[in-house]
Amino acid sequence: MQEVVLDVKSREVTGKAVSSLRSEGLVPGVVYGQGKDARIVAVDTAELERVYNEAGTNRLIQLKIDEAKKALNTLFVDVQHDPVSGDLLHFDLYTVKMDEEIETEVPIHYEGTAPATYNHDGVLVKNFETIDVRALPNKLPESFVVDLEKLEEINDSVHISDLAVPEGVEILNDPEDLVVKIDPPRSEEELEQLEEEIAEDAEEQVASEHGADEEEGEEGEDSDTKEEGDSDSKEDNEDQG
Protein backbone atom coordinates (compact mmCIF):
# COMPACT_ATOMS: atom_id res chain seq x y z
CA MET A 1 0.00 0.00 0.00
CA GLN A 2 1.39 3.37 -1.01
CA GLU A 3 2.36 5.71 1.82
CA VAL A 4 0.07 8.70 2.40
CA VAL A 5 1.94 11.90 3.25
CA LEU A 6 0.51 15.22 4.44
CA ASP A 7 2.52 18.41 4.98
CA VAL A 8 0.97 21.02 7.29
CA LYS A 9 2.06 24.34 8.80
CA SER A 10 1.83 25.53 12.39
CA ARG A 11 -0.66 28.37 12.89
CA GLU A 12 -1.19 31.05 15.49
CA VAL A 13 -4.67 32.12 14.43
CA THR A 14 -7.40 30.71 16.70
CA GLY A 15 -11.07 31.21 17.58
CA LYS A 16 -13.31 33.17 15.24
CA ALA A 17 -10.26 34.49 13.43
CA VAL A 18 -9.80 31.12 11.68
CA SER A 19 -12.36 32.30 9.14
CA SER A 20 -9.54 34.38 7.69
CA LEU A 21 -7.59 31.17 7.05
CA ARG A 22 -10.50 29.65 5.15
CA SER A 23 -10.76 32.76 2.99
CA GLU A 24 -7.12 32.13 2.06
CA GLY A 25 -7.86 28.57 0.97
CA LEU A 26 -6.58 26.93 4.17
CA VAL A 27 -8.26 24.54 6.61
CA PRO A 28 -7.44 24.72 10.35
CA GLY A 29 -6.73 21.53 12.27
CA VAL A 30 -5.40 20.01 15.49
CA VAL A 31 -2.82 17.25 16.01
CA TYR A 32 -2.82 15.45 19.37
CA GLY A 33 -2.28 12.11 21.11
CA GLN A 34 0.24 10.02 23.04
CA GLY A 35 0.30 12.46 25.93
CA LYS A 36 1.87 15.24 23.87
CA ASP A 37 0.62 18.81 23.77
CA ALA A 38 -1.88 19.47 21.02
CA ARG A 39 -0.54 21.42 18.07
CA ILE A 40 -2.71 23.70 15.96
CA VAL A 41 -1.98 23.60 12.26
CA ALA A 42 -3.37 24.57 8.85
CA VAL A 43 -3.15 23.06 5.39
CA ASP A 44 -4.18 23.84 1.82
CA THR A 45 -7.81 22.84 1.25
CA ALA A 46 -7.18 20.95 -2.00
CA GLU A 47 -4.31 18.99 -0.44
CA LEU A 48 -6.40 18.03 2.58
CA GLU A 49 -9.28 16.88 0.38
CA ARG A 50 -6.91 14.73 -1.66
CA VAL A 51 -5.39 13.07 1.39
CA TYR A 52 -8.70 12.55 3.19
CA ASN A 53 -10.32 11.01 0.10
CA GLU A 54 -7.35 8.66 -0.19
CA ALA A 55 -6.90 7.75 3.47
CA GLY A 56 -10.30 8.05 5.12
CA THR A 57 -10.21 7.17 8.81
CA ASN A 58 -8.36 3.87 8.57
CA ARG A 59 -5.14 4.55 6.66
CA LEU A 60 -1.98 5.81 8.29
CA ILE A 61 -0.88 9.31 7.34
CA GLN A 62 2.76 10.33 7.52
CA LEU A 63 2.32 13.84 8.90
CA LYS A 64 5.07 16.44 8.56
CA ILE A 65 4.68 19.67 10.50
CA ASP A 66 6.66 22.66 9.23
CA GLU A 67 8.69 20.41 6.92
CA ALA A 68 10.05 18.34 9.81
CA LYS A 69 12.42 15.56 8.76
CA LYS A 70 10.67 12.98 10.96
CA ALA A 71 7.02 12.27 10.19
CA LEU A 72 4.35 11.42 12.74
CA ASN A 73 2.11 8.35 12.31
CA THR A 74 -1.41 9.74 12.44
CA LEU A 75 -5.03 8.94 11.61
CA PHE A 76 -7.98 11.20 10.88
CA VAL A 77 -10.39 11.04 13.82
CA ASP A 78 -12.68 13.91 12.89
CA VAL A 79 -13.24 15.95 9.74
CA GLN A 80 -15.94 18.62 9.77
CA HIS A 81 -17.75 19.72 6.61
CA ASP A 82 -20.07 22.64 5.95
CA PRO A 83 -23.59 21.08 5.92
CA VAL A 84 -24.66 23.16 2.93
CA SER A 85 -21.61 23.53 0.69
CA GLY A 86 -19.76 20.41 1.83
CA ASP A 87 -16.55 22.42 2.18
CA LEU A 88 -13.97 21.21 4.72
CA LEU A 89 -14.05 23.33 7.89
CA HIS A 90 -11.75 21.60 10.39
CA PHE A 91 -9.84 18.36 10.96
CA ASP A 92 -8.37 16.40 13.87
CA LEU A 93 -5.39 14.06 13.51
CA TYR A 94 -4.46 11.57 16.22
CA THR A 95 -0.87 10.45 16.71
CA VAL A 96 -0.70 6.67 17.11
CA LYS A 97 1.85 4.22 18.47
CA MET A 98 2.64 1.44 16.04
CA ASP A 99 2.73 -1.18 18.82
CA GLU A 100 -0.67 -0.24 20.32
CA GLU A 101 -4.02 -1.41 18.93
CA ILE A 102 -6.60 1.21 18.01
CA GLU A 103 -10.32 1.13 17.26
CA THR A 104 -11.69 2.71 14.12
CA GLU A 105 -14.11 2.22 11.22
CA VAL A 106 -13.28 0.46 7.96
CA PRO A 107 -15.51 1.04 4.90
CA ILE A 108 -17.35 -1.72 3.05
CA HIS A 109 -16.85 -1.89 -0.70
CA TYR A 110 -19.80 -3.51 -2.50
CA GLU A 111 -18.77 -5.10 -5.79
CA GLY A 112 -20.90 -6.28 -8.70
CA THR A 113 -24.67 -6.59 -9.06
CA ALA A 114 -26.88 -9.06 -7.22
CA PRO A 115 -28.54 -11.46 -9.76
CA ALA A 116 -31.59 -11.71 -7.50
CA THR A 117 -32.42 -8.06 -8.22
CA TYR A 118 -32.92 -8.62 -11.95
CA ASN A 119 -33.86 -12.31 -12.07
CA HIS A 120 -36.42 -12.21 -9.27
CA ASP A 121 -37.08 -8.46 -8.80
CA GLY A 122 -35.54 -8.70 -5.34
CA VAL A 123 -34.82 -5.59 -3.27
CA LEU A 124 -31.19 -5.11 -2.23
CA VAL A 125 -30.95 -3.84 1.35
CA LYS A 126 -27.58 -2.58 2.63
CA ASN A 127 -27.35 -2.25 6.40
CA PHE A 128 -23.72 -1.20 6.81
CA GLU A 129 -21.36 1.23 5.13
CA THR A 130 -18.53 0.76 7.65
CA ILE A 131 -17.38 -1.94 10.10
CA ASP A 132 -15.91 -1.29 13.55
CA VAL A 133 -12.52 -2.93 14.07
CA ARG A 134 -9.59 -3.15 16.48
CA ALA A 135 -6.04 -3.66 15.20
CA LEU A 136 -2.50 -2.36 15.16
CA PRO A 137 -2.23 0.74 12.95
CA ASN A 138 -0.25 -1.09 10.26
CA LYS A 139 -2.76 -3.98 10.21
CA LEU A 140 -5.83 -1.90 9.42
CA PRO A 141 -7.47 -3.11 6.18
CA GLU A 142 -8.25 -0.57 3.49
CA SER A 143 -11.79 -1.94 3.14
CA PHE A 144 -13.97 -5.04 3.41
CA VAL A 145 -15.17 -6.35 0.06
CA VAL A 146 -18.67 -7.78 -0.33
CA ASP A 147 -19.35 -9.63 -3.61
CA LEU A 148 -22.98 -8.95 -4.54
CA GLU A 149 -22.79 -11.46 -7.41
CA LYS A 150 -23.27 -14.23 -4.82
CA LEU A 151 -26.76 -12.99 -3.94
CA GLU A 152 -28.74 -15.04 -6.47
CA GLU A 153 -32.00 -15.80 -4.68
CA ILE A 154 -34.59 -14.02 -2.54
CA ASN A 155 -33.51 -13.96 1.14
CA ASP A 156 -29.83 -14.51 0.28
CA SER A 157 -27.69 -12.49 2.67
CA VAL A 158 -24.22 -11.69 3.98
CA HIS A 159 -23.56 -11.49 7.73
CA ILE A 160 -20.66 -9.89 9.59
CA SER A 161 -19.35 -13.41 10.21
CA ASP A 162 -19.12 -13.98 6.43
CA LEU A 163 -16.58 -11.19 5.88
CA ALA A 164 -12.99 -12.06 5.04
CA VAL A 165 -11.02 -10.69 7.98
CA PRO A 166 -7.22 -10.24 7.71
CA GLU A 167 -5.00 -11.71 10.40
CA GLY A 168 -4.53 -9.38 13.35
CA VAL A 169 -7.87 -7.62 12.85
CA GLU A 170 -10.75 -7.99 15.32
CA ILE A 171 -14.31 -7.18 14.23
CA LEU A 172 -16.24 -5.37 16.96
CA ASN A 173 -19.71 -5.72 15.40
CA ASP A 174 -22.05 -8.59 16.29
CA PRO A 175 -21.17 -11.58 14.03
CA GLU A 176 -24.89 -12.22 13.43
CA ASP A 177 -25.59 -8.71 12.11
CA LEU A 178 -26.78 -8.60 8.50
CA VAL A 179 -24.50 -6.63 6.21
CA VAL A 180 -26.68 -6.94 3.12
CA LYS A 181 -29.69 -9.01 2.12
CA ILE A 182 -32.23 -9.60 -0.66
CA ASP A 183 -35.83 -8.85 0.28
CA PRO A 184 -38.83 -10.08 -1.75
CA PRO A 185 -40.28 -7.58 -4.25
CA ARG A 186 -42.88 -5.23 -2.78
CA SER A 187 -46.51 -5.89 -3.63
CA GLU A 188 -48.78 -3.27 -5.19
CA GLU A 189 -50.46 -2.81 -1.80
CA GLU A 190 -47.11 -2.24 -0.06
CA LEU A 191 -46.05 0.30 -2.70
CA GLU A 192 -49.35 2.16 -2.37
CA GLN A 193 -49.02 2.19 1.42
CA LEU A 194 -45.44 3.46 1.13
CA GLU A 195 -46.57 6.28 -1.18
CA GLU A 196 -49.37 7.20 1.24
CA GLU A 197 -46.95 7.32 4.17
CA ILE A 198 -44.57 9.55 2.20
CA ALA A 199 -47.45 11.86 1.24
CA GLU A 200 -48.69 12.03 4.85
CA ASP A 201 -45.21 12.85 6.12
CA ALA A 202 -44.91 15.61 3.53
CA GLU A 203 -48.30 17.07 4.51
CA GLU A 204 -47.40 16.99 8.21
CA GLN A 205 -44.12 18.75 7.51
CA VAL A 206 -45.85 21.47 5.47
CA ALA A 207 -48.53 21.89 8.16
CA SER A 208 -45.87 22.11 10.86
CA GLU A 209 -43.91 24.75 8.96
CA HIS A 210 -47.12 26.69 8.19
CA GLY A 211 -48.10 26.60 11.86
CA ALA A 212 -44.69 27.89 12.88
CA ASP A 213 -45.02 30.76 10.38
CA GLU A 214 -48.46 31.66 11.77
CA GLU A 215 -47.13 31.69 15.33
CA GLU A 216 -44.29 33.99 14.31
CA GLY A 217 -46.79 36.26 12.56
CA GLU A 218 -49.05 36.39 15.61
CA GLU A 219 -46.09 37.15 17.87
CA GLY A 220 -45.10 39.96 15.54
CA GLU A 221 -48.65 41.39 15.58
CA ASP A 222 -48.82 41.21 19.37
CA SER A 223 -45.50 42.99 19.58
CA ASP A 224 -46.66 45.73 17.19
CA THR A 225 -49.92 46.17 19.14
CA LYS A 226 -48.01 46.39 22.42
CA GLU A 227 -45.66 49.00 20.98
CA GLU A 228 -48.62 51.05 19.69
CA GLY A 229 -50.31 50.81 23.09
CA ASP A 230 -47.13 51.90 24.85
CA SER A 231 -46.79 54.81 22.46
CA ASP A 232 -50.41 55.95 22.99
CA SER A 233 -50.01 55.67 26.75
CA LYS A 234 -46.86 57.77 26.61
CA GLU A 235 -48.62 60.46 24.56
CA ASP A 236 -51.56 60.58 27.02
CA ASN A 237 -49.18 61.05 29.92
CA GLU A 238 -47.40 63.85 28.12
CA ASP A 239 -50.75 65.60 27.41
CA GLN A 240 -51.72 65.31 31.03
CA GLY A 241 -48.38 66.76 32.09
Image (spheres, rainbow, N blue to C red):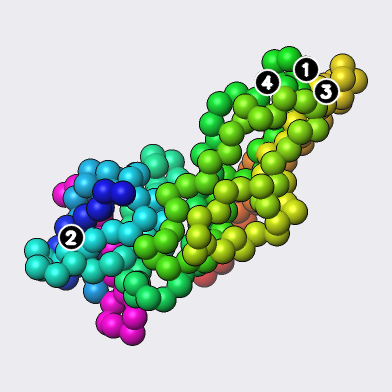
Question: Looking at the picture, does residue 132 appear above or below residue 162?
Answer: below
Question: Is 86 placed left or right of 148 in the picture?
Answer: left
Q: Nearer the viewer, residue 227 or 192?
A: 192
Q: Residues within 10 Å of mark 1 (few under 14, many from 20)?
A: some
Q: Quick one: label 4 or label 2, which is nearer the N terminus?
A: 2
What is the distance, in whole Å, between disc 4 and disc 1 at their CAs? 8 Å
Mark 3 or mark 1, whichever is nearer to me: 1
- Provide residue 98's location: percent of width, then percent of height: 34, 72
Q: Quick one: label 3 or label 2, which is nearer the N terminus?
A: 2
Q: Residue at x 73, y 38 (%)?
A: 157
Give the labeled residue for mark 4: 115
What is the distance, in whole Å, between disc 1 and disc 2 at their CAs? 53 Å
Mark 3 or mark 4, whichever is nearer to me: 4
Question: Is 113 placed left or right of 86 in the picture?
Answer: right
Question: Is 171 placed left or right of 174 in the picture?
Answer: left
- Amino acid carrying label 2: it is Val
Which structural element holds mark 3? loop
Q: Say which mark, if any, is on residue 8.
A: 2
- Provide residue 196's location: percent of width, then percent of height: 83, 25
Give the labeled residue for mark 3: 186
